[in-house]
Image (cartoon, grey):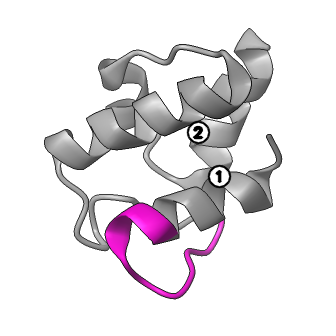
Amino acid sequence: MTQSEVAGLMAEILETDDLAADESFFEVGGTSFLVLTLIARIQERTGVTLRMIDVIRRPTPAGVHALVDGLS
C-alpha cells in the first residue's frame, strides 16, 4: 500500500477530499473509533494488522504508511 493510498483511505474514512502526507488524522476529525475502521480496512487490503497505539502515535498518512511498510 502506497502513501498515496493510505492518504486516500484516510480521506475516505473522514469524508474529506484529501489529506497531505504530514496532516494528522485526528486534526481533520478522526476519532479512536475511526482509527479502528482504518486499521480494519488496511488489514483487509494488505493483510497487515496495526496496533491502535501505533496509529495514534503516527497519525499521518506518511506515518501510517511507514508502519504498514515496516510490517509487510
Quadrant of the snapshot with the C terminus:
top right
Q: Where is residue 65 in the image (x, y as percent from the top left)?
A: 69, 40
Q: Earlier in the sequence, mark 1 or mark 2?
A: 1
Q: In this view, does 23 lie above or below 42?
A: below
On residue 64, the disc is 2
Position of 54 with respect to 68 (left or right) is left
Tell me the crowding category of disc 1: few under 14, some 14 to 19, or many 20 or more residues within 10 angstroms, Cα based: many
Which secondary structure lies at badge 1? helix
Q: Position of residue 54 (x, y in %)?
A: 42, 23
* Residue picked out by circle 1: 6
Mark 1 to mark 2: distance in Å? Answer: 7 Å
Q: Is the magenta stretch mostly helix, strand or loop?
A: loop
- Does the stretch in magenta take in 19? yes
Q: Quadrant of residue 5?
A: bottom right
Q: Is residue 28 above or below residue 52?
A: below
* Circle count: 2
Residue shown at 65%/52% (left/top)?
6
Q: Is residue 42 above or below residue 72?
A: below
Residue type for callout 1: Val
- Does the stretch in magenta take in 63? no
Position of 41 with respect to 32 (left or right) is right
Residue shown at 25%/48% (left/top)?
34
- Closer to the camera: disc 1 or disc 2? 1
Residue shown at 57%/34% (left/top)?
42
Q: In which quarter of the image is residue 46?
A: top right
Tell me, yes or no, whether the two marked residues, 1 and 2, touch with CB atoms within 8 Å.
yes
Tell me the crowding category of disc 2: few under 14, some 14 to 19, or many 20 or more residues within 10 angstroms, Cα based: many
Q: Nearer the viewer, residue 34 or 54?
A: 34
Q: Which of 2 and 42 is in front in this view?
A: 42
On residue 69, the disc is none
State which region is magenta.
12-21
